[in-house]
């Protein structure tokens, strides 16, 4: 292949590569737009109106939304400290074993709160 033939092949190769890159870019941008759609677009009708919430039990659309907070508490208390008692025994002999009682009964408590939306039908009282 001569130098002039290589020079002529470069723009053709560049054009093919650019068309492939543009096609990939278009596919990626379409998928990003689909992922970026808000969740409420799923509830749209074809006419552009939003659907109302419908009760699964009675079929009524008289439904209200309330936020409910769920609180859970977990606790852990400390027991006898064997390492403290061994060090106390080495330092103070037999009365040093009582050092293991230091900090006994104290504990850590963890409280977590979760917010949850509850849908309540005003006609039949169903919660979902």
Image (cartoon, rainbow, N blue to C red):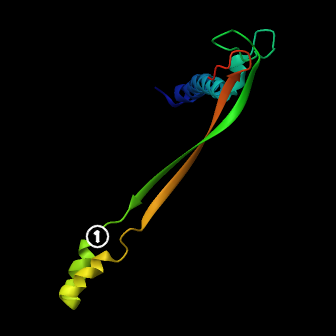
| Crowdedness near tag 1: few (<14), some (14–19) or many (≥20) residues, C-alpha within 10 Å | some
Q: Residue at x 49, y 55 (%)?
A: 110
Q: Residue at x 35, y 71 (%)?
A: 104
Could you tell whether 40 is left or right of 105 in the image?
right
The residue tagged 1 is 80
Is residue 33 visible in the rendered image? The answer is: no
Question: Looking at this view, is 12 or 56 the one in front?
Answer: 56
Question: Looking at this view, is 117 or 39 the one in front?
Answer: 117
> For numbered disc 1, what is the local secondary structure?
loop
Q: Is residue 75 above or below residue 103?
A: above
Could you tell whether 8 is left or right of 41 in the image?
left
Q: Where is residue 39 drawn, in percent x and y? A: 68, 26
Occupied quadrant, residue 92: bottom left
Occupied quadrant, residue 79: bottom left
Q: Where is residue 60 drawn, in percent x and y? A: 73, 11
Is residue 55 visible in the rendered image? The answer is: yes
Q: Residue at x 20, y 84 (%)?
A: 89
Q: Where is residue 6 drawn, in percent x and y? A: 52, 28
Q: Is residue 104 above or below residue 45?
A: below
Question: Looking at this view, is 124 or 15 the one in front?
Answer: 124
Is the C terminus in the top left, top right, bottom left or bottom right quadrant?
Answer: top right
Could you tell whether 105 is left or right of 110 in the image?
left
Occupied quadrant, residue 26: top right
Q: Residue at x 71, y 17 (%)?
A: 43
């Amino acid at each position: 292949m001569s130098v002039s033939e290589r020079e002529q092949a470069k723009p053709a190769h560049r054009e093919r590569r650019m068309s492939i890159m543009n096609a990939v870019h278009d596919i990626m941008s379409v998928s990003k737009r689909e992922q970026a759609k808000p969740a409420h677009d799923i509830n749209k009708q074809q006419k552009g109106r939003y659907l109302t919430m419908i009760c699964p039990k009675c079929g009524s659309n008289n439904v209200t939304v309330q936020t409910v907070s769920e609180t859970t508490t977990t606790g852990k208390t400390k027991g006898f400290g064997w390492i403290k008692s061994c060090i106390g025994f080495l330092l103070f002999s037999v009365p040093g074993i009582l050092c293991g009682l230091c900090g006994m009964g104290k504990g850590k408590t963890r409280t977590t709160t979760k917010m949850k939306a509850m849908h309540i039908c005003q006609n039949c009282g169903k919660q979902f």
